[in-house]
Amino acid sequence: MNPLIDKLKAVKASGKPVIGCFPLYPPLELLQALDLEPVVLWGLKPFYPRTPKSDQHLQNFVCSVGRHLAEFVLSEASDLVDGLFMYNACDTLRNLPEILQSGLEDAGRAKPIFNIHVPQAPRRQTDAAGYLADEIQNLIETLGRHFGVEFSPSRFRATAEQQNRARTLARELDAETASGRMSFRRLADLMYGNCFRPLDRQIQVMEAALETCRTAEPRTGPGVLLSGIMPPPSSVSSVIEEAGLRVAGNDIASLARSYAHSPDPALPPADYYVDLYYNHFPCSTLLGTADERPAALEALAEERGARGIIFLGEKFCEYEYFEFPHLEKRFKERGLHTLNLEFAIDDDQNPGPVRTRIEAFAELMS
Amino acid sequence: MLQPLKPKSRDSLGRIMTRYYEGNHLEAAKGKFVVWIAIIVPTELLKGFDLIVCAPESHSAMCAARKVGAAQCEKAESVGYSMDLCSYARIDLGTFFDQGRGSPSMGLPRPDLLISNNDNCSLLVKWFDVYHREYGVPHFVMDVPFCYQSQQEKDRRYILNQFQDLIRLLEEMTGQKFDYDKVREAVRETNEAMKHWTRFLKLAAHRPSVNTAFDSFAHMAPYFTWMRGDPALTEHFKLLADEAEAELAAGRFPVPNEKYRLMWDNIAPWHQLRRMSTRLAELDANIVWSTYATSIGRVEDRLDFFEWDGGDPLHYLARLQNRGWCCYGMDLRYKAMAEMIERYSIDGIVFGSNRSCKVYSVMQMDLQKRLARDFGLPTVMIDVDHADVRKYNEENVFLKLEAMMERIAAEN
């Protein structure tokens, strides 16, 4: 049986409806305030080494995030999820809902899909705060009607505070990784595990991890940043660290881009999400943040003393690939070393093809 | 055997497009304000100003049609842009990084402002961001919500607000005052042009068709330029429709022994317009209809042209932001294709699975299954990049096309 099923059963044990959220940055606090239990559908590769169901619906030039997501939804594991949530995170994800519903229909199943449109125009050009506020309100009403749940402002505040606590802990773990007291591989695995844990359990796991690493012997070695949509396969993370490099920081969508910013939990939901999305750590998929991204990365590199950056290209993620050449150029102009790696759906745990390149890159900096 | 027809329209097309590209460079050299747009950005709104408007996507399509697409792509790839990126983007970026060399129009004049939108695809925004950084000019991003059903009022209001922001920005940057009446006139003119375009397209209903989809692909070009909202477009589309009607009356058809009436789904295969149409004609096959050529002027699942009712032109243009094909979902596409099949007596569907255009291609596997099931139609999915000939294999494609035609013949 797919081990994901056990994880989902553990989440479902809370008795609350479980909502599978498409990446990248779903409004988790809102779902929790409605007494729903969100899980974020990242990091599905270990559970779906092959994607036969997805392959009946998606061409092979769709990225692994889309294909694994489709595989999950079309598989039995998704029966443990009571609904799906998505927003316009990228062109592939915006096209998925009807494809998934078509596939579920073929299998005699159904799953409600809820969505909002997150404004993408830069705020200095178009103030869409009012539009986003309406989208949030509509979502609250739609979910409330469907699941027979009521939105609670006090519960929203409480979960926003908890989410902020979770993000704070994640940032502390990130700092421990930067200092060498925690391996990046462990950080990445822990954060992926959190995608399928209830929030209070996420906090417990992170607190325990922090306790352990505070007494660990820090690894030394030149610091590098990792940048991309997802961490590399865990074997590649090990290769990076075995090559003597220290991951001084990351600009990874499923990691630091997700936990870098915490809005004020006292804000009402509309204002909270205007803050979350407009002040988000720059991401290639949040179109309005593109101008801020190079400076944000450079500031991170400087703050953490990174001497290089490894770009982790998720194959077929055009959002990242349109930005890599410019970022690479900016880093090189500042005397930093850069390395471009690419990972596709078929790249499994064999780090062989990239080991030599990573080791050569490490030698440049030692 | 393909009978090349519509000579007057062909000459007209060559003339107006040459005048357009040359004119842009000449006017820009005189200091006129230059705007680059994504093709769904409402050109008619920009007619409220005195500008030059260029569309990089159209430029890329022209490069691909003139067989320089692959060479231009390689230039972008050599400076780090992945081969997996949209070939339109790679062609245009390659042209930019080589200062216009290799492009039949020597590229486009330097922009003063970039206007993209994300209803076709978000990658247009990322592509224009490259120019925003390289040229150091402002980039206005028009955010258009994707629709799974008809465009909603809340989204139309949001788009209208963005139009106002754009107008304010243009007034600031150009020092000109927005001329609302000119926009009204441009919308009226586009409507006139689209009546003729629709008249031309509908002639495909005749068996054999007096048109091929390849005609429509070529003649779409002026719509995606500054000529939209201009009498030049109306004149060209009128000439095209008149000429097609005359050929119908005279019994002159591009594929006189038309046995297979096919529909094409995806962007035009620009590098194969003549080759594919000729080879299909030799097999007595005609692609009589395409979702691509019919996407201009219609919205969502409606097959007919979405006419202006004479009301506020800005409201009309906001409504039209969900035209095209890629800005709405599978259900709406299915409904439109279902009506196309019925109206135009389609025998088979060719789905061009296009690595450069996920937004067009990603729904195709499910659309193919549904349409084949509901209409009992033979269908085929071929691999074809619309602008990068390196991702096209003619023999593989025709193996599949011929197999489909054999099935059509057997079932008929």
Image (cartoon, rainbow, N blue to C red):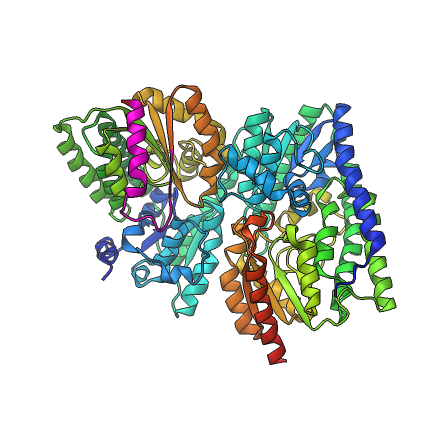
What x and y, as percent, mark residue B155? 57, 46
Q: Note whether residue A285 is visible.
A: no
Most foreground residue, B394 or A150? B394
Q: Is residue A106 left or right of residue B102?
A: left
Q: Note whether residue B370 is visible.
A: yes
Q: State the image quarter where residue B214 is shown.
A: bottom right
Quarter of the image that includes the N terminus of chain A:
bottom left
Q: Residue at x 68, y 57 (%)?
A: B275
Quarter of the image that includes the C terminus of chain A:
top left
Q: Is residue B199 left or right of residue A316?
A: right
What x and y, as percent, mark residue B28? 74, 27
Q: State the image quarter where residue B112 is shown.
A: top right
The number of numbered discs placed on residues in the rendered structure image is 0
Q: Is residue B74 above or below residue B174?
A: below
What x and y, as percent, mark residue A173? 23, 32
Indicate whether residue B369 is drawn in magenta: no
Most foreground residue, A77 or B96? B96
Q: Is residue B152 left or right of residue A90?
A: right
Most foreground residue, B204 or A328? A328
Q: Specify start and end residues of the magenta stretch as a single range.
A: A340-365
Q: State the image quarter where residue B163 is shown.
A: top right
Q: Residue at x 28, y 43 (%)?
A: A351
